[in-house]
Amino acid sequence: TYSNVPAILYFLEKGAQPTGTVYDILRKAEFFKEFRVSFDKKESKKKNRE
């Protein structure tokens, strides 16, 4: 499967928040590790659960 990385980065840099499903797909593809993109809302919610 092909991910249009430049388009994904463009929208994320503009402030787009991925849906839960899209977030999971990007996480499984290690998108966040590779591009060091973070989502404060998502990450803070997950940290609060732990």
Image (cartoon, rainbow, N blue to C red):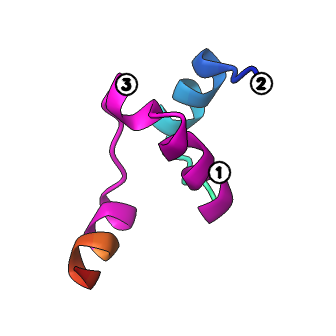
Q: Earlier in the sequence, mark 3 or mark 2?
A: 2
The residue at 32%/72% (across/down) is 46
Estimate how packed mark 1 is, as few (under 14), some (14 to 19) or many (20 or more) residues with alpha carbons within 10 Å: few
Work out which residue is located at the far right of the displayed protein and give it.
1
Is residue 32 located in the magenta-colored stretch of the structure? yes
Q: CA distance from mark 3 to mark 2?
A: 18 Å
Q: Which residues are magenta?
A: 20-44
Give the quadrant of residue 32: top left
Residue 10 badge: none
Residue 25 point in image, percent of width and height? 62, 46
Residue type beneath disc 2 = Thr
Seen in the image, is 37 located left or right of residue 17?
left
Depth check, mark 2 against mark 1: the one in front is 2
Residue nearest the viewer, comparing 50 with 11: 50
The residue at 36%/66% (across/down) is 41
Depth check, mark 3 against mark 2: the one in front is 2
Q: CA distance from mark 2 to mark 1?
A: 14 Å
Mark 1, residue position:
22
Relative height, residue 37 to residue 2 (above, below): below
Mark 2, residue position:
1
Seen in the image, is 40 located left or right of residue 20?
left
Estimate how packed mark 3 is, as few (under 14), some (14 to 19) or many (20 or more) residues with alpha carbons within 10 Å: few
Give the quadrant of residue 10: top right
Work out which residue is located at the far bottom of the displayed protein and give it.
49
Residue type beneath disc 1 = Val
Residue nearest the viewer, comparing 15 with 31: 31
Relative height, residue 8 to residue 48 (above, below): above
Q: Earlier in the sequence, mark 3 or mark 1?
A: 1
Mark 3, residue position:
35
